[in-house]
Image: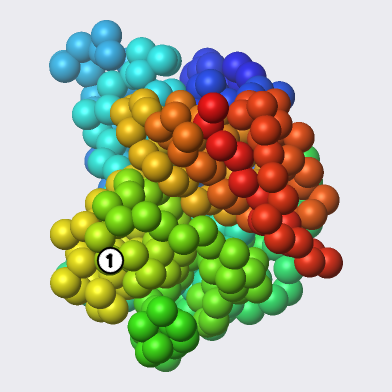
Amino acid sequence: MLSPFFLHDKQLTLVRFPLAQVNRSLQAWDAADEYLLNYINTEQLFSEKSRIVIFNDAFGALTTHFCLPKTTSITQPNNPDVYCVNDSYISSQGIACNIEQNSLSNNNITQLNCLDTLPQDIEVILFKIPKSKSLLIEQLIMIKDCVDQNVTGQKPIFIAADRAKDIHSSTLKLFEKYLGTTTTSLAVKKARLVFCQFDQKQKHKSPFPTIWPLPNKALNCDFTISNHANVYSREKLDIGARYFIENLPCVAENSEVIDLGCGNGVIGLSILAQQPSAKIQFFDESHMAITSARENISNNLPNLITHCQFQLNDCLSNVESNSVDLILCNPPFHQQAATTDHIAWQMFKDSHRVLKKGGELRIIGNRQLAYHIKLKRIFGNEKLIASNDKFVTQSAIKR
C-alpha cells in the first residue's frame, strides 16, 4: 500500500518492502515515527551539521526526513550526516527504495548493519525500539560503548520511540540499566517517546554471541552453536527446529540444497553432517543470522565451508530458476511488528521457481498456520511428513 506521509515541509509517499508482497494493506510508517519527527523538529534538536544515527528504521520514514531532493542545488545548505543502522536487509532495501521513489538524494545517508562499528561524535540518536529484547540489549550496550569513547566528551541526545502498549516497565529498566536516567513522554496517537541520559557508570559487556551445544547423531558429537543477538533460539535449540531436524530427508550425493530463512544455520549444518558432498546455500534477510550461520559452519565443519554460500536476500529474489534439488524452510509469520503470511507466500512461490523438476520443498510450521493450503495451491500437491500437537512437517514436489 502506498502510504502518504505528510510532515512539516515533507510530502512523501512511502511503501513497505518488498514491493511484490501479497499483503499490501499495511502502511510503511507508524505513529511512533510521526511523534519522533514532530518532537525533534519542534524542539529544534538538529542542525544541518549534526551527526545523527537512526536505529531500526523499518522502511525509511525517519531516514527520508533528512534527505534533500535530487534537484537541490549544491549551493543550498546540506542536510545532516545520517547513519542508518538495521539488522534487516529488507529494511535497508526498503529505505533505499523510498529514497529513490521520492526523488531524494542519498548523499548524506550511510547504511550500516548491526555488526558494523558506529561512527564517533554522534550528536543525536533516534531509536525505534526493536521487538527482540536481545537485540535491544545488544544495541544499548553498543551505543553506550560508542558514547563513552567520544573524544569530545559530548553526550548525544537520545530519543527512543514505539507504540505505548509495547513500552513496559521492564523495557524502561533496560534503558536505565544500560544507558542511565530514563524518562518518558505522554502518549500521542498511542505512541510514546523514551528519553535517556548517558549517566550510567557501570560498564556492561555484550553477552552475544551466545554459545551452546547441539548434539549431532550423524557424527556422534556435539556441535558448538553461535547465536548473535537478533537470531532466534539464542540459548538452545528451539522445539520447532528440533522437530524439523528429526524429520529431514535423506539427501543424495552432490545435491544442491537451500536452507531458506536459515537463522543460525542448524538445519543446513545438519544436512551437511549427514551428506558432506551436498552444496548448501544459506539465505536470510538478517545480517546477524547470516553471520551466525557462517560461523557455525566454520567452527563445526571447517573442511566443508567451501561447499557453502551465505547470502542476504529477500527470500530467493534473483536466484536462478530450476537450479536446486531441495529447499528446507521454517517460514516466519511476522514482519517487524506486523503479523502477516506474505513472507510464507513469497518463500513458497520462490521455492517453486528455483527448484528443479522433481525437486522438493520441505517445511515446518505451527499447525494453525495451515501451510498445506498454500503448498497445494502453488505446487499442486503436498504431503504430511510428520506432526505433533504443535508442529507439522510437510513436503511439496515440483512436477
Give the vertical position of 204 relative to 355 (above or below).
below
Q: Secondary structure at mark 1?
A: loop
Q: Nearer the viewer, residue 273 or 64?
A: 273
Q: Is residue 298 visible?
A: yes
Q: Nearer the viewer, residue 189 or 353?
A: 353
Q: Nearer the viewer, residue 196 or 23?
A: 23
Residue type, mark 1 in image: Pro
At x 63% / y 69%, what residue is drawn?
A: 243
At x 35% / y 72%, what residue is drawn?
A: 273
Residue 98: image quadrant is: top left
Residue 187: x, y in percent?
Answer: 76, 51
At x 53% / y 31%, what residue is drawn?
A: 398
Residue 178: x, y in percent?
Answer: 48, 79
Residue 25: image quadrant is: top right
- In the rendered image, which quarter contains the C terminus? top right
Residue 380: x, y in percent?
Answer: 66, 27
Q: Nearer the viewer, residue 234 or 219?
A: 219
At x 28% / y 78%, what residue is drawn?
A: 300
- In the rendered image, which quarter contains the N terminus? top right
Give the vertical position of 27 relative to 35 (above or below).
above
Q: In the image as oriented, which residue stretches furthest toward the top?
A: 71
Residue 347: x, y in percent?
Answer: 54, 37
- Counting the numbered discs, the total is 1
Residue 89: image quadrant is: top left
Q: Is residue 269 visible?
A: no
Q: Residues within 10 Å of mark 1 (few under 14, many from 20)?
A: some
**How did the renderer colour the structure?**
rainbow
Residue wearing tag 1: 276
- Image side of residue 198 versus residue 369, left or right: left
